[in-house]
Amino acid sequence: MSGDYPHLHPSARAWADEDAPSRVRRIRTDRWIGYARAQAALAAIEDVLSFPKRTRMPNLLLVGPTNNGKTMIVEKFRRSHPPIAAVDAEDGIARVPVLKMQMPAGPDERRFFGAILDELGMDHWPKERVAAQQNLAVRLMRTADVRVLVIDELHNVLSGPVLQQRRLLNLLRWLGNELQIPLVGVGTAEALRAIRSDDQLANRFEPVALPLWDEDEAYRRLLSTLEALLPLRKPSGLAQPALAGKIFALSEGVLGEIVSIVTRAAAVAVTSGAEAISPRLIEKTGFISPTGRRRVAV
Ligand SMILES: Nc1ncnc2c1ncn2[C@@H]1O[C@H](COP(=O)(O)OP(=O)(O)OP(=O)(O)O)[C@@H](O)[C@H]1O
Ligand SMILES: [Mg+2]
């Protein structure tokens, strides 16, 4: 079957003629949708990146509930500032403009600098002495000309004892000052709580919120964009009230759930031959809302 598929984005039209397995694979692949809040968050991160070095660098905290698109945003940011390999650099020195790490669980200085050294591609580093690790990490970050340090899962700071939390928060402040680079923290409301527990950090971090979605125009736009990118041969009208309402209720306003409901339904639409998503087809996927899943788990 071949058609024009006017309901699809031009980039997705050619896919609609592919066989079922390859379309299901495409449906299951992560895609980037530049919804308004994501674009605003990206612009805010770009803005701190372009700041000239000064003693007090601006920091950001991207904060929102779990599964709501935070990591996707910082990954997108990193992709737009890719590393430059040593062989491609004029002076033969590799550059890592955006260094993204995850705050380790039960973090201490050793794990923290270990995570940085891992990201810089160091396989072996002095395991015994924290001071040596710290010196090496800072030296390598300078050499690689790191311009912004992104720390995902920042709320993990709170998983250690209080004294340890203080030490790590002090360390963050010290690192930003020492390198004179902005820090971009990423995490849940707990991360915001961690930052706010330290007065000096609190006034250095500007929160950028990524709240749960409302059932509004932005939500319907998101559904329309998603629909246009999924290679179904018939239009579903996801933004129409019946479907939009059903997806919203099941998702509880969480972006990852919205995407997951729609993509699961789209895969069934392909394999069943229905070729469009309907409320009944969503039921068929047996999707359980986040609250329902938590209930099952206890
Ligand atoms: N910009 C986007 N475009 C398309 N899909 C997205 C986008 N952002 C998030 N998603 C979907 O939502 C899911 C969750 O996103 P992400 O992993 O970024 O959440 P998170 O806020 O970092 O969650 P956590 O706090 O649990 O780490 C992704 O796997 C993807 O399916
Ligand atoms: Mg994440």
Image (cartoon, rainbow, N blue to C red):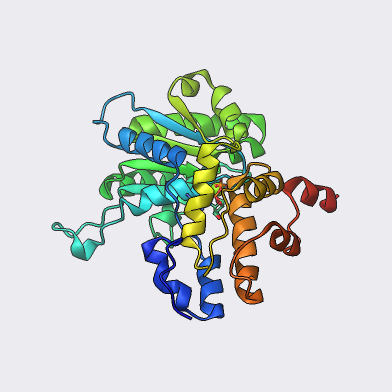
**Where is residue 236 shown, x and y percent of the image?**
57, 59
Q: Is residue 39 above or below residue 260?
A: above
42 or 105, nearer to the observer: 42
User: Can I make out residue 214 in this image?
Assistant: yes
Residue 249 placement, left or right of 43 = right
What residue is at 33 percent from the left and 46 percent from the top? 141
Q: Residue furthest left?
A: 90
76 or 59, nearer to the observer: 76
Residue 52 placement, left or right of 289 = left
User: Can I make out residue 127 in this image?
Assistant: no
What residue is at 77 percent from the left and 45 percent from the top? 291
What residue is at 33 percent from the left and 23 percent from the top? 56
Q: Is residue 34 above or below residue 59?
A: below
Q: Is residue 259 above or below residue 248?
A: below
176 or 81, nearer to the observer: 81
What residue is at 31 percent from the left and 45 percent from the top? 146
Q: Is residue 54 above or below residue 281?
A: above
**Where is residue 295 shown, x and y percent of the image?**
83, 48
**Where is residue 208 shown, x and y percent of the image?**
47, 31
**Where is residue 274 shown, x and y percent of the image?**
63, 71
Quadrant of residue 191 within the rendered picture: top right
